[in-house]
Structures are given as C-alpha cells and as structure tokens.
Image (cartoon, helix red, strand yellow):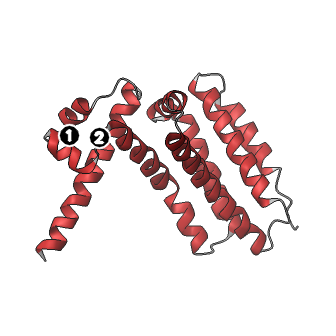
Amino acid sequence: MNENKNETMKREKRAMILDTARGIFGQKGYANVTMADIVSACGISRGGLYLYFPSIEELFQEVVIDQSKQKFAIINQRVANQEPFEEIFTQYLDLQKTRLLNIDDSILVATYEYYNSHQETEQIAFQKSYVDYLTETIRELLMLGKAQGIILNDNIPQLADMFIMLLEGISIFKTFNQIDEEQINQQLSLLKQQLIYAY
C-alpha cells in the first residue's frame, strides 16, 4: 500500500515539475532557463529535481514529448478504439487550429531554439523521434480512414509526412506573426482537400 502511495506521489511530483517547467520554457525560451529557475519555481530542492531530471536538456526533452502526448492523447485513443474517421479527423484539425492560434502560450519558440543549437547525433535523434511521433499520429488516423473505406488514398505515409511538414511550416509563420486565422483556415482546408473520399 505504501509502495503504491509512494509511486503515486512520485508521478504527481514529476508531473508538477514538467508542468512548471513548461511554463518557464514558454516564458523564457530554452537557452535562458537554468535548473535554479526550475528549483525556485517548483519549490523543491536541487537534489529533489536532479532525482527526476539530471540536466536541463533532459528536462526540456521530456517537456516537449509530454506536451505532445497530452495534446493528442484523445486522438490516439479514439483511433485505437476505431471510432468514425471523419469525427476524429475533424477533432484533429480543430486541435491543430487551437494549437496554431495559441502559439504564444506554447514552448514552440523554445523548441526551435533548442533544435537550432543542438546538432549532435543524440540530439538529432531526439528531434527525429519527436517528429516521428507527430507523424505517426496522423498516419494512424489516415490508415483508419482507409480501413473504414472512407478515404481511398494509397500514399498514406507520404500524405502523413506532408501534413506534418505543412503544419510545422504554419507553426513557424505563426510564431513570427506572419499568418492570421483566415490563412490558417485556408491551409487546413487545403490539407483536407488532399484526401480522396470514397463518396
């Protein structure tokens, strides 16, 4: 019983650290955040933080992955449950639109900053695994649409790559205030037009 309680407390503390760190990275970027900032904001000891995350880089990587998993968990769950493709696809695009319209509240700038300054093999592998995760979400969704007979596209892997490349491109434009809501709607509509429907 105590062991279960301890595990629950550890999970909760880890989640609190990630949530707090997400806010700090969102405000200050990647390069300007130190472990001391995280310790102070979390109200924990330096040793307590290092038990969970041995470096600012590992903490940041976990924040990025955790945020993506939280954001699209509902999509992945609905795909696993084989719910109707069109409903999930609409929700996916709505989540993407919400993400794009709220770029200022995200850690996207910090993520680009990290990508630009971290080019070692291990760091590039992390970046690739992150993009692979994003691509897998839409690929699995599109494969569901094909399995349900809703879409006829044969080039699902290439289509998924295109979705992510376009969405990440929009993210960059929105980060620098070079695209507005109407243009985002137009681009998302163009994405929808890439699907060949069976009816």
Q: On residue 87, which mark appears?
A: none
Q: Which image quarter is the C terminus in?
A: bottom right
Where does label 2 land, which residue? 20
Q: Which image quarter is the N terminus in?
A: bottom left
Q: Which SS class for mark 2?
A: helix
> Going by the picture, which residue comes out furthest to the front?
121
Mark 2 crowdedness (10 Å alpha carbons): few <14, some 14-19, many ≥20: some
- Please tell me in which quadrant of the rendered image residue 178 appears: top right
Q: Residue at x 29, y 40 (%)?
A: 20
| Side (left or right) of 29 relative to 95 | left
Q: Residue at x 16, y 46 (%)?
A: 48
**Among numbered discs 2 and 1, the one appearing first in the sequence:** 2
Is 90 drawn above or below residue 77 in the view shown? above
Q: Residue at x 59, y 22 (%)?
A: 176
| Side (left or right) of 37 relative to 139 | left
Q: Give percent across and percent down for residue 122.
A: 50, 44
Mark count: 2
Q: Which SS class for mark 1?
A: helix
Q: Give percent across and percent down for residue 180.
A: 65, 27
**Front position in the image: 91 or 175:** 175
Marks 2 & 1, CB-CB < 8 Å contact: yes
Q: Give percent across and percent down for residue 135.
A: 64, 53
Could you tell me how far apart the alpha carbons at marks 2 and 1 are, in whole angstroms? 7 Å
Mark 1 crowdedness (10 Å alpha carbons): few <14, some 14-19, many ≥20: some
Kind of residue indicated by mark 1: Cys
Is 12 drawn above or below residue 184 in the view shown? below
Q: Give percent across and percent down for residue 142.
A: 72, 62
Q: On residue 42, which mark appears?
A: 1
Kind of residue indicated by mark 2: Thr
**Front position in the image: 2 or 71:** 2
